[in-house]
Image (cartoon, helix red, strand yellow):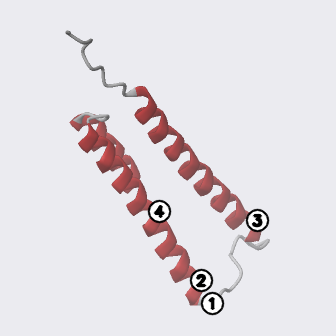
Amino acid sequence: MIGRPVVVRRRPLLRAAAVGATVAVGRAVRRHAQQRATTGAAGNPPTRPAVPAQASAASSEAAMMDQLSQLSMLHQQGALTDDEFAAAKAKVLG
């Protein structure tokens, strides 16, 4: 009995990547809006201790690493071509 050829569906994987990127962008926009809201009238942010800033930098770095690992996984699975992976990686890294 000859079966039908196996078709790899890429749309669900690409959709998952798009949703993940959308969530990350939404978080960045929300964080930016919060920073604007806390900015003083003179345009200078209020004085804050250094520890939360370091924690914020660490969390954004962790989020970037999560995005890169997700992109790498999609590339290894064949959902992203080499060019698509390079473009997405450049976008994440800035």
> Taking 64 as reference, is 85 left or right?
left
Whether label 1 touches label 2, CB < 8 Å: yes
Horizontal placement of 15 versus 34: left or right? left
Give the Cα distance between marks 3 and 4: 23 Å
- As shown in the figure, which amino acid type bears the numbered disc 2? Pro
Q: Which residue is mark 2?
A: 52
Q: Residue 94: x and y, percent? A: 39, 54
State the image coordinates of residue 52 (x, y, percent, origin top left). 59, 83
Location of mark 3 (residue):
37
Amino acid type at circle 1 is Pro
Q: Measuring 68% from the left and 75% from the top, which residue is drawn there? A: 44
Q: Is residue 40 left or right of 65 when viewed as pictured? A: right
Tell which circle, 3 or 4, labels the residue nearer the N-terminal end. Answer: 3
* Above or below, 19 relative to 94: above
Disc 1 packing (10 Å; few <14; some 14–19; many ≥20)? few
Residue 64 visible in the shown view:
yes
- Tell me the tag on residue 63: 4
Give the mark nearer the N terminus: 4 vs 2. Answer: 2
Dot 1 falls on a residue whose secondary structure is loop
Q: Residues within 10 Å of mark 2 (few under 14, many from 20)?
A: few
Q: Earlier in the sequence, mark 4 or mark 1?
A: 1
